[in-house]
Image (cartoon, rainbow, N blue to C red):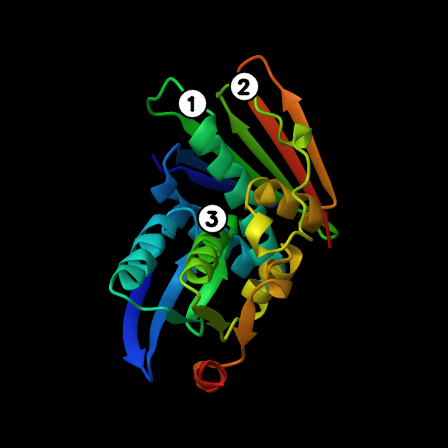
């Protein structure tokens, strides 16, 4: 799994490439917490290159969402593929998290 | 410890150490089976996810005494169904005993506890647990 972080228009974008599974969850969580520690409050999780997520990965997203709420910030999960979307849907996460079809759309929504 | 063999009737076996960094081998294993058996991507992901969730539980909770242990995963693919068998020598652990998470809770109250097994129940047609003389056995059946 490779994580690339970028800053755009006041948002921290975390792009995850590969699998967000039990082996990689800890790394992803640490990356997010580092971004939050730097003072970011608006986040986009770019899943366009993420092939797969399991419950361990969902835990990272949940931790992030709760942290963002405590910061009174925002988190949008963008560009989920079918497998990822299905896992979000099965777990009920789709209805409690903000999602977008693309990073561009997410950036637009963060401006609103 | 790698071991993978396949006999004529479509069975493949992999032996995994009880470490999370073995998950990559699990994914590669199903990738290859999926290729050979011409599985749709969705089936490949469903089988991989189900096994990863169960395997992760075993790795995290199955060996409180520590040490290196082997978990055996065997897959038999038939024309109309796939059967997976997970066997380990760990402490008794029956995933069927766990209640379902409440997936309707809002963000504040949500946790991910129990989600793994919840997914397995949703994705597989059958999940059977047996406590053997030496450990745990879980059998999954997915109808195609």
Residue at disc 2, secondary structure:
loop
In-image side of A47 versus B132 (left or right): left
**Residue B98 appears in view:** yes
Q: Nearer the viewer, mark 2 or mark 1?
A: 1
Label 1 to label 3, Cα distance in Å? 19 Å
Rendered image: mark on residue B63: 1
Q: Are marks 2 and 1 in contact (CB under 8 Å)?
A: no
Label 2 to label 1, Cα distance in Å? 11 Å
In-image side of B140 versus B62 (left or right): right
Q: Position of residue B70 (x, y in %)?
A: 41, 28
Q: Position of residue B122 (x, y in %)?
A: 70, 49
Quickly name the residue at label 2.
B135
Q: Are marks 1 and 3 in contact (CB under 8 Å)?
A: no
Residue beneath the point at 44% across and 74% down:
A48
**Residue B38 appears in view:** no
Q: Nearer the viewer, mark 2 or mark 3?
A: 3
Indicate the quadrant where residue A73 lies: bottom left
Q: Chain of mark 2?
A: B
In-image side of B55 versus B120 (left or right): left
Q: What quarter of the picture does the N terminus of chain A occupy? A: bottom left
Residue sitting nearer the eye, B84 or B8 = B84
Q: Chain of mark 3?
A: A
Residue at disc 1, secondary structure:
loop
Residue beneath the point at 70% across and 31% down:
B128
Quickly name the residue at label 3.
A56
Residue beneath the point at 45% across and 70% down:
A74
């Amino acid at each position: 799994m490779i994580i690339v972080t970028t800053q755009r228009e006041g948002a921290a974008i975390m792009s995850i490439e590969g699998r967000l599974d039990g082996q990689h969850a800890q790394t992803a969580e640490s990356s997010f917490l580092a971004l939050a520690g730097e003072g970011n409050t608006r986040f986009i999780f770019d899943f366009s290159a993420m092939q797969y997520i399991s419950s361990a990965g969902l835990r990272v997203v949940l931790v992030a969402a709760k942290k963002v709420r405590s910061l009174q910030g925002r988190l949008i999960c963008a560009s989920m593929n079918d497998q990822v979307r299905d896992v979000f849907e099965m777990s009920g996460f789709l209805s409690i998290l903000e999602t977008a079809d693309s990073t561009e759309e997410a950036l637009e929504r963060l401006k609103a | 410890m790698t071991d993978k063999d396949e006999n004529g009737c479509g069975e493949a076996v992999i032996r995994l150490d009880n470490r999370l960094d073995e998950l990559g081998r699990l994914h590669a294993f199903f990738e290859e089976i999926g290729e050979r058996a011409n599985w749709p991507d969705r089936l490949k992901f469903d089988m991989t996810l189900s096994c990863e969730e169960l395997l992760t539980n075993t790795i995290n909770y199955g060996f409180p005494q520590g040490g290196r242990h082997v978990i055996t995963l065997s897959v038999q693919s038939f024309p109309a169904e796939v059967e997976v068998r997970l066997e380990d020598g760990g402490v008794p652990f029956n995933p069927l005993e766990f209640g379902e998470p409440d997936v309707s809770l809002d963000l504040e109250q949500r946790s991910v506890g129990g989600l793994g097994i919840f997914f397995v129940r949703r994705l597989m047609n059958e999940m059977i647990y047996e406590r053997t003389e030496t450990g745990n056995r879980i059998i999954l059946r997915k109808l195609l």
